[in-house]
């Protein structure tokens, strides 16, 4: 027999597929990763970067759970920046520019090094489904590969269609074929599918760019990192640059609107609201004279450059003419034009909270097939699908994160309870408990959960224990140590803060705006000697906990109230039309989503607080 029966078959080797495969493999499942092209495993199809606002928190959460995205990023990044430092710590978001080629290579080598991961290069054209249970996949050659569970992470490949002006090409990515057969089979089984659109900008020859007229954007010094493991520090960084469009650029782009697939109706799918194409931006924001563009290198040694903010599906001649009117790009050469891609997705309200489909047992969806956009959003879904596929075939309880646990929990909860009709992207504003869900405490929140699942995270847990101990010691030091007014007078006056009038505990001084542990340590030798024994990350974590203790406590109380609603279970196949006290909309939405708990029901769009009261009475609460 060509193939044994695998525990988990993962279809697609993008960011979702890679995390799904390694998650299941690390849990002990025998995994087959099926991809159309072994050369494009973990390919960064769009911008060569990981992290960003809320996305950086997700990468750290994946790492805290034993995933690999943070490790791969640390090994292959060329620049690191902590975004939103001028705002509160709930908004701080790590972001890294990656070397595109090295990123894909590192992921592949780490997957190949795992004894539980096998590979097969071929298109999957269908699924083996018996008695409502996924039992494997069927390839384009007609090969049947048996499996106890299947995770679909097809990205933009399901009936993918590439648009460049009036030209349309079948494909899931430039130069790669679309995947056919899966959508049609699932629709025949009763699944609902729809179309979405995303896009990418032209790639530019960096040798043809005039860098001197642009604003340089360096990385942080010293550079940070994503992973809680011992990954190598980034000692040398490559800068990014900033330039802008102008009215001449906009006028040229407008001449192509009559050939734009977006404006002529050839693209039916909705594009990402928060990452629009340049033609969409100048159409929607016609009052803006210019738009910011980020000029991002694709790696250490390549001259290929990514023009972030200039995504387009206009004809290639229009793209090129407009490009050369951008400051710094007067003599630019394109490697390839930008394009839009339209593809099938399945509304995620058809999933259970563990990423398993409601219609077919042991079939899981993750990534853009669920209507999301972004590497990070895809990767965390893949990790959760891989973990839950392993748990399902071993008859164990599903692993479900709450909204108060993580951004991952917020994302999955939003998708399944609210659905999406446009590419879903994570933002800090989507999380109601974002003071709890900071990038600096992902390990404290999630690594103990990973350990309880049986994931190998001993190295991370050792660090968690050390961080917890350091936090307690630093807190005790500040609560017990007193400071004389003369010791801190100049420091406080320089900050514009009132000087002390009497001896005071150091913790009260720290709670003042703009006062920091490092600032105090610079003028207080005994404090400097004390904090020198701790990892700087531990010191920052302790400072945030001290300064925001009141807010953290309030959010924790709110989260615990919501968690109590999560403990009130609902029958999986209950017919809500029997409860006359519910509104008509609530009956419809509850019957469609089939929430597992009262908490989940409360977050379904269209289910009001009064409907929840009716449900609580109905279940005897």
Image (cartoon, rainbow, N blue to C red):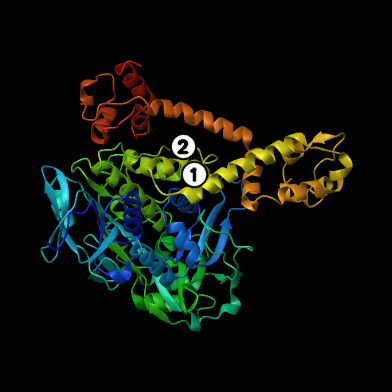
Camera-side residue of 524 and 46: 524
Q: Position of residue 104 (x, y in %)?
A: 39, 68
Dot 2 surroundings within 10 Å: few (below 14), some, or many (20 or more)?
many
- Residue 356 appears at what percent x and percent y? 26, 43
Q: SS at mark 1?
A: helix
Query: How many marks can you see?
Result: 2
What residue do we see at 32% from left, 69% from top? 40
For marks 2 and 1, give the CA distance: 14 Å
Q: Which mark is residue 551?
A: none
521 or 196: which is nearer to us?
521
Residue 490: x %, y % from top left: 86, 48
**Residue 250 visible to an observer of this rendering:** yes
Residue that numbered label 2 is attached to: 404
Q: Secondary structure at mark 2?
A: loop
Query: Where is 206 relative to 261, above or below?
Result: below
Q: Does 502 sit left or right of 24 as displayed? A: right
Crowd band around label 1 with a 10 angstrom C-alpha radius: few (<14), some (14–19), many (20+): few
Q: Quadrant of residue 327?
A: bottom right
Instruction: Name the residue tied to disc 1.
Output: 429
57, 10: nearer the viewer: 10
Q: Residue at x 36, y 54 (%)?
A: 378
Question: Of marks 2 and 1, which one's residue comes earlier in the chain?
Answer: 2
Instruction: Say which quadrant the C terminus sits in.
Output: top left
Q: Nearer the viewer, residue 75 or 51?
A: 75
| x and y, in percent, of residue 328 in the image | 54, 78
The residue located at (46%, 37%) in the rendering is 404
Q: Quadrant of the N terminus?
A: bottom left
Instruction: Indicate the quadrant where residue 146 lies.
Output: bottom left
Q: Is residue 85 left or right of residue 590?
A: right
Q: Is residue 81 left or right of residue 203?
A: right
Q: Left or right: where does residue 559 sit relative to residue 135?
A: right
The nearer-to-camera label among 2 and 1 is 2
């Amino acid at each position: 027999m060509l193939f044994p029966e695998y525990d988990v078959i993962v279809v697609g080797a993008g960011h979702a597929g890679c995390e799904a495969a390694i998650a299941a493999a690390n849990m002990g499942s025998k995994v087959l990763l099926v991809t159309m092209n072994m050369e494009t495993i973990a390919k960064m199809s769009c911008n060569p970067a990981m992290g960003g606002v809320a996305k950086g928190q997700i990468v750290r959460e994946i790492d805290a759970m034993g995933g690999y995205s943070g490790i791969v990023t640390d090994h292959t990044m060329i620049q690191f920046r902590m975004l939103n430092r001028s705002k509160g710590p709930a908004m701080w978001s790590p972001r890294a520019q990656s070397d595109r080629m090295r990123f894909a290579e590192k992921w592949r080598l780490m997957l190949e090094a795992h004894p539980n991961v096998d590979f097969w290069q071929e298109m999957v054209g269908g699924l083996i489904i018996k008695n409502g249970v996924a039992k494997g996949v069927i390839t384009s050659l007609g090969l049947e590969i048996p499996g106890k569970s299947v995770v679909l992470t097809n990205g933009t490949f399901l009936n993918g269609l590439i648009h460049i002006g009036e030209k349309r090409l079948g494909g899931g990515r430039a130069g790669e074929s679309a995947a056919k057969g899966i959508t049609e089979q699932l629709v025949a089984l009763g699944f609902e599918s729809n179309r979405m659109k995303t896009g990418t900008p032209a790639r530019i020859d960096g040798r043809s760019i005039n860098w001197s007229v642009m604003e340089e954007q360096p990385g942080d010094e010293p550079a940070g990192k994503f992973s809680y493991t011992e990954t190598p520090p980034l000692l040398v960084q490559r800068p990014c640059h900033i330039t802008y469009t102008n009215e001449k650029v906009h006028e040229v782009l407008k001449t192509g609107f009559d050939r734009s697939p977006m404006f002529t109706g050839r693209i039916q799918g909705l594009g990402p609201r928060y990452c629009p194409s340049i033609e969409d931006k100048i159409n929607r924001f016609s009052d803006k004279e210019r738009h910011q563009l980020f000029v991002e290198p694709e790696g250490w040694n390549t001259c290929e450059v990514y023009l972030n903010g200039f995504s387009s599906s206009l004809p290639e001649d229009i793209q090129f003419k407009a490009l050369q009117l951008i400051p710094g790009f007067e003599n630019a050469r394109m490697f390839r034009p930008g394009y839009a891609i339209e593809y099938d997705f399945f509304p995620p309200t058809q999933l259970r909270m563990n990423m398993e489909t409601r219609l077919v047992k042991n079939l899981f969806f993750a990534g853009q097939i669920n209507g999301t956009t972004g590497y990070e959003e895809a990767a965390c879904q893949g990790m959760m699908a891989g973990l839950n596929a392993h748990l399902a075939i071993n008859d164990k309880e599903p692993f479900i994160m709450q909204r108060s646990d993580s951004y991952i929990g917020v994302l999955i909860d939003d998708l399944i309870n609210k659905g999406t009709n446009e590419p879903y992207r994570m933002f800090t504003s989507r999380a109601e408990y974002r003071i709890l869900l900071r990038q600096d405490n992902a390990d404290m929140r999630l690594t103990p959960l990973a350990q309880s699942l049986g994931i190998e995270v001993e190295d991370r847990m050792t660090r968690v224990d050390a961080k917890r101990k350091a936090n307690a010691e630093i807190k005790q030091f500040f609560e017990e140590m007193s400071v004389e007014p003369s010791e801190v007078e100049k420091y406080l006056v320089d900050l514009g803060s009132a000087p002390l009038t009497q001896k005071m505990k150091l913790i009260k001084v720290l709670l003042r705006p703009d006062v920091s542990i490092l600032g105090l340590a610079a003028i207080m030798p005994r404090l400097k000697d004390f904090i020198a024994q701790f990892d700087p990350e531990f010191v920052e974590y302790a400072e945030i906990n001290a300064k925001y203790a009141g807010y953290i406590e309030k959010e924790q109380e709110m989260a615990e109230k919501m968690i109590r609603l999560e403990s009130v279970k609902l029958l999986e196949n209950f017919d809500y039309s029997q409860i006359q006290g519910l509104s008509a909309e609530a009956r419809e939405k509850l019957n469609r989503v089939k929430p597992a708990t009262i908490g989940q029901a409360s977050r379904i769009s269209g289910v009001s607080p009064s409907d929840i009261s009716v449900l609580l009475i109905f279940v005897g609460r």
